[in-house]
Image (cartoon, rainbow, N blue to C red):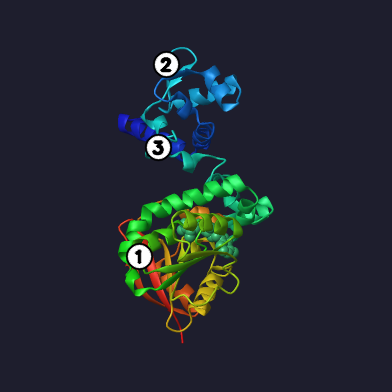
Amino acid sequence: MSTSTTTTTTDVARQLDVLTDLVTPWAMRVAATLTLADRIGDSAVTVDDLARHSGAVPDTVGRLLEHLAARGVFAPDGPHRYRNTELSHRLRRDHPMTLHPWLDIEGGMGQYDIGLSALLLAVRTGADAYTPTFGRSFFDDLNTDAERAAAYDDLMASLTAWTLPEILQAYDWQTVAHVTDVAGGSGALLAGLLRAHPHLHGTLVDHARAARTASARFAEEGLADRATALAGSMFDPLPPGADLYLVKSTVMGWGDGSGAADILRRCARAAGPGGRVVVAEFLRGAPRLVPSLDLYMALLGGKERTEEEFRALGAAAGLTLRDVRPTPSGYCLLEFTPDA
Ligand SMILES: C[S@@+](CC[C@H](N)C(=O)[O-])C[C@H]1O[C@@H](n2cnc3c(N)ncnc32)[C@H](O)[C@@H]1O
């Protein structure tokens, strides 16, 4: 065997290991969930201390750290002691670019990650695999766990904070008087729009847990006179009267034949003639903030869509796609108007 063939074979084996090893991504999540990097901070800490801090068993904490240290995450610093590395620092909650909220198994993304065990079923059926696997829908599950739901809402709000400047820039909000944020989560987007545009009024519709948080946010930010949060379903009639119905990062959670068109149809009916519906999502094929999002959505029976798929979805819901405004991050604002 030639040297180059040997090198290639080794490279392929390494790449395959990276692609197929399920232990390391979970070990990273366990370390994040146990906040080991936070405990270590800028010094070196013993395995016993880390186990005590995280309410875990020293032997298994040691084996977890050994596994991760072999991959450059944490570094041994004397017998049974570890310090942080550049990689493990990113697990710290006080790091400005912390990965903790994304990796915490008990946090906002944990439910999606656990749900990945249903990906085979999702691929086989093309439908929501979360509900048959876990016994209730993703959001019904979320709504029963207040802490996890709060973490999920916070994570969504942090993504919104990140994309807000682009959303403000990409659309002429001066042409809007009243916006209804459908499935608006904890209100980060609506609050951001209203802060930037003092003429704007807004309504948010979401499940009761999110509507409560949004209400508190509006009050805290002094926006209660211009923003209202309503507990309700986007599959029921939406409050009429707004001139623009905004749906961000939500249509992707539903399939063409199972909900996505219904959401848009509700928006179209509430908007009425002369109204507008704006969907804000990443488009399939464009660079995306979370490259794996499409397969997370597949778990729920949803999907990211191309512009053409959105055009067809809108048509099925009585909407015509008028404009697509991309933003630098790949986020797009798709503007629809209801058909006469
Ligand atoms: C991915 S989050 C997006 C939240 C927000 N639009 C954002 O961009 O941050 C999806 C939202 O849909 C809400 N949701 C799910 N089912 C809903 C329903 N039937 N009616 C209203 N909201 C719903 C969830 O509670 C959640 O806040």
Which amino acid type is shown beneath numbered disc 1?
Answer: His
> Would the CB of label 3 be found within 8 Å of ligand 1?
no
Quick one: label 2 or label 3, which is nearer the N terminus?
3
Residue lying at 44% horizontally and 36% vertically, measured from the top left:
93
Q: Quadrant of residue 172?
A: bottom left
Residue 239 appears left or right of 86: right
> Would the CB of label 2 be found within 8 Å of ligand 1?
no
Vertical side of 143 occupied by 244: above or below? below
Q: Position of residue 278 (x, y in %)?
A: 42, 70
Tell me if label 2 and label 1 are in contact, CB under 8 Å: no
Residues at marks 1 and 3, CA–CA distance in whole angstroms:
54 Å
Q: Secondary structure at mark 2?
A: loop
Residue lying at 53% horizontally and 49% vertically, measured from the top left:
152
Q: Position of residue 82 (x, y in %)?
A: 45, 20
Q: Which residue is mark 2?
A: 77
- Residue 12 - label: 3
Quick one: label 1 or label 3, which is nearer the N terminus?
3
Vertical side of 332 occupied by 57: above or below? above
Residue lying at 52% horizontally and 79% vertically, measured from the top left:
269
Residue lying at 37% horizontally and 38% vertically, measured from the top left:
96
Q: Nearer the viewer, residue 30 or 34?
A: 34
Q: Nearer the viewer, residue 213 or 139?
A: 213
Q: Which residue is mark 1?
A: 197
Which amino acid type is shown beneath numbered disc 2?
Answer: Asp
Quick one: label 2 or label 1, which is nearer the N terminus?
2
Residue 174 in sight here: yes
Q: Nearer the viewer, residue 258 or 170?
A: 170
Q: Secondary structure at mark 3?
A: helix
